[in-house]
Image: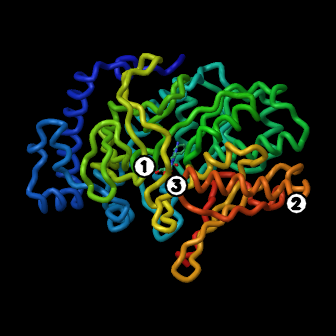
Amino acid sequence: MSIWDPDYECMPREEMEQLQLERLQATLNRVYKNVTCYRNKFKELGIVPEDVTSLADLSKLPFTTKEDLRLNYPYGMFAVPLREVVRIHSSSGTTGKPTVVGYTKQDVKVWSNLVARFMTAAGVNHDDVVQIAFGYGLFTGAFGLHYGSEMIGASVIPMGAGNTEKQIMIMQDYRTTALVSTPSYAVTIAERMEKMGIDPKSLCLKVGLFGGEPWSEAMRREIESRLGISATDNYGLSEVIGPGVAGECQCKCGMHISEDAFLAEIIDPDTGKTLPPGSIGELVLTSLTKEAFPMVRYRTRDITSLDYTKCDCGRTTVRMKKTMGRSDDMLIIKGVNVYPSQIEDVLFAVDGCQPHYQLVVDRKGALDTLEIRIEVTENIFFDEMKLQKAFLDNVERRIDSVLGVGAVVKLVEPNSIPRAEGKASRVIDNRKI
Ligand code: DLL
């Protein structure tokens, strides 16, 4: 069986908007009645759910932020009593209290279906053997993809993250065809395979479903050539459901958002104003079907744009572009806004760069400094000084011309940058210490 909802995924725009409006109204009624935080926010603005009579009215509604979730920790944002909640997850935030999210039985069913949908779009079917290399636990990644795979009828190997050599052994022995992980862990796996002398072509692997962190097109090419697979991107966040918000089809030209379940807007992160279609800005999501933990205009902080043009696959749902990163990960260096993913794109374009790098931002007096530490292939590392210098000059020049900010590039020894098993951490900002 493959999960493919042509009724929803190929719906004409007008019908989709009608469906979204009906589901939005139901959601607003539910949160107004059951969640104090929303009722108070609506009252402050002098609005009631009945005021929303078209999708254009969405912009009248208040935003929800991570701060709201923190203030209502742990269960204050739940719209159903705890006895109806069958699953609890948490966001991956590293500072302060995590945010807690809940699912009813019906929410878990819808979630599994949404994940099955994007996995199907990426090319997974019931014949596949899916190896889940996300950490099982409070993180939504593993359970989301696990339930989605089962819904498709694929055979799931619940490996969890880490233990890379065992991952590879299982991949060989159990004839894994689909790998689920963060893109940076996929690189770690590829690298280890090379060290172990295993030719990826000798495996049955054909597709990768990667998400949980930003990654560039250059990184995709790297993974595809090293693992010999088709690498697809999928996006989600725990506050809104987890994985299952959006995913790429085999055309790989943006991630189809499941619009029957989520309403997407792009806003200017500074002013909060809704931006016209095609603009780059912050993605704001409203859930349309969730029972336990509905979200109204949740500010994701992720910077992207929406593409409403027709996709060759036939799906009519809007596609979100690969994210540039989170607005809170944006580095302001000497007044210039820089996303780590832009630096990644430049690095990948230079021969000899490995996909392992770290950005160290500091302040000397009043001046910001950016140091880019990159691992290079062994032959460049051991090559003569003159060649190394030419390599460094080349990278520095490119960074300056593409990003408009000067950086000092340093070569570090092969294997000295810690390898990711989950989400990679690439920035050390000493200005924040
Ligand atoms: O990372 C959910 C997820 C798991 C999505 C597995 C896809 C696959 P959180 O831990 O709450 O949830 O982190 C959400 O991760 O706001 C983005 O900043 C980032 N993120 C997730 N997927 C992508 C992606 C999960 N494909 C935060 N591209 C989000 C870029 C992503 N960033």
**Residue topped by disc 1:** 303
Q: In the rendered view of the protein, which quadrant contains the C terminus?
A: bottom right
- What is the distance, in whole Å, between disc 3 and disc 2 at their CAs? 31 Å
Asked whether 165 or 231 is in front, the reply is 231
Tag 3 near tag 2, CB within 8 Å: no
Tag 1 near tag 3, CB within 8 Å: yes
Asked whether 223 or 275 is in front, the reply is 275
**Residue topped by disc 2:** 385
Q: Position of residue 61 (x, y in %)?
A: 19, 51
Q: Position of residue 421 (x, y in %)?
A: 69, 52
Residue shown at 34%/45% (left/top)?
Answer: 285
Q: In the rendered view of the protein, which quadrant contains the N terminus?
A: top right
Residue most extreme to the bottom: 365
Report whether the residue tagged 2 is closer than 8 Å to ligand 1. no
Q: Is residue 358 above or below residue 50?
A: below
The kind of residue tagged 2 is Met
Residue shown at 60%/34% (left/top)?
Answer: 209
The kind of residue tagged 3 is Tyr
The kind of residue tagged 1 is Ile
Q: Earlier in the sequence, mark 2 or mark 1?
A: 1
| Element type at mark 1 | strand
Q: Nearer the viewer, mark 2 or mark 1?
A: 2
| Element type at mark 3 | loop
Q: Earlier in the sequence, mark 3 or mark 2?
A: 3
Q: Nearer the viewer, mark 1 or mark 3?
A: 3
- What is the distance, in whole Å, between disc 2 and disc 1 at their CAs? 40 Å
In the rendered structure, the answer to whether residue 242 lies left or right of residue 355 reads left
Q: Is residue 188 above or below residue 335?
A: above
Q: Is residue 362 above or below residue 141?
A: below
